[in-house]
Image (tube, rainbow, N blue to C red):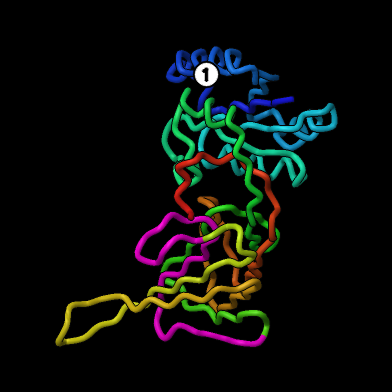
Amino acid sequence: MYLYVYDEIVQGQRFERELALIETRLTDLGISGKIARLALFRDAEELIKDEIRRGTQTVVAVGNDQTLRKVMDAVGDPKVVVAIIPLGPGNNIAQILGVPSGVAACDVLSARLVEELDLGSVNGMRFLHVVTLEGAQPACTFEGNYTLTPAVKSSLAIRNLAESDELGAANPTDGKLEFVMKTPRRSWLIKKTDEVSTVPFKKLQLKSSEMMSMLVDGEKLEGTEFEIKVLPRQVKIVTGKDRKYV
């Protein structure tokens, strides 16, 4: 059984025609299901868990990265498959997963290429993609026994799922997260560049005497101490054959 969770952002007139095309295509493919429309007064977690208790085996986020994150948080059960039909802006995760926007995503869903992916956790908040901090200088302790502290305020990222770039792809199936630190390097003789350090890890603690602000898959989180760890194979998710993380 399929549950399609329509986020508030796709419920206006702007997406009315495209949603109608999506619903028709899902029916043609034989994978139509119940539709749940999120609203400010409806608890996504309660709604989704109720449907899972009734037998739903696949929950599909219809919206963007934030919709997918709401759905993953609400599902919780690694036996239930999660998928996305991307609509509108803010769909970086869907692109990396190889899921095209709009009605074309229905065929990816129908092909049902399911992978078990790792998640990351920051003080209990789960993430699939990446955590970023700008202008930070915390003490970074890896696995409880090795500490690295930036000499100056630096840009930090913790990657779980990322397409190939100058650092390479981040593999969300290897049981590790990747710490990336970009430190400004200045010289009178050469053009300003960043010194890049990367460290794979399973558990990381960040501590600072100053308040730190980070984005966890786009959601803001503040504090002076963070515990970040990998959660191996925590989500079953539908990907496309053109996924970009391998």
Residue at which label 1 appears = 22
The residue at 45%/50% (across/down) is 244
Range of magenta residues: 145-170
- Secondary structure under tag 1 reads helix
Q: Is residue 187 left or right of residue 17?
A: left
Q: From the viewer's perspective, is residue 12 above or below residue 182?
A: above
Q: Amino acid at mark 1?
A: Ile
Q: From the viewer's perspective, is residue 173 above or below residue 92?
A: below
Q: Is residue 164 magenta?
A: yes
The residue at 14%/87% (across/down) is 189
Q: Is residue 136 left or right of residue 110?
A: left
Task: Give residue 131's position: percent from left, percent from top.
Answer: 52, 60
Q: Is residue 92 left or right of residue 217?
A: left
The residue at 63%/41% (across/down) is 114
Task: Give residue 220's position: percent from left, percent from top.
Answer: 54, 54
* In the foreground, 178 or 112: 112
Q: From the viewer's perspective, is residue 221 above or below residue 137?
A: above
Q: Is residue 169 magenta?
A: yes
Taking the view exactly as shown, the residue that stands out farthest to the left is 189
Q: Is residue 36 left or right of residue 200?
A: right
Q: Main secondary structure of the magenta part?
A: loop
Task: Give residue 4's position: percent from left, percent from top.
Answer: 64, 26
Crowd rating for badge 1 (residues with CA inside 10 Å; few <14, some 14–19, many 20+): some
Task: Give residue 233's position: percent from left, percent from top.
Answer: 69, 55
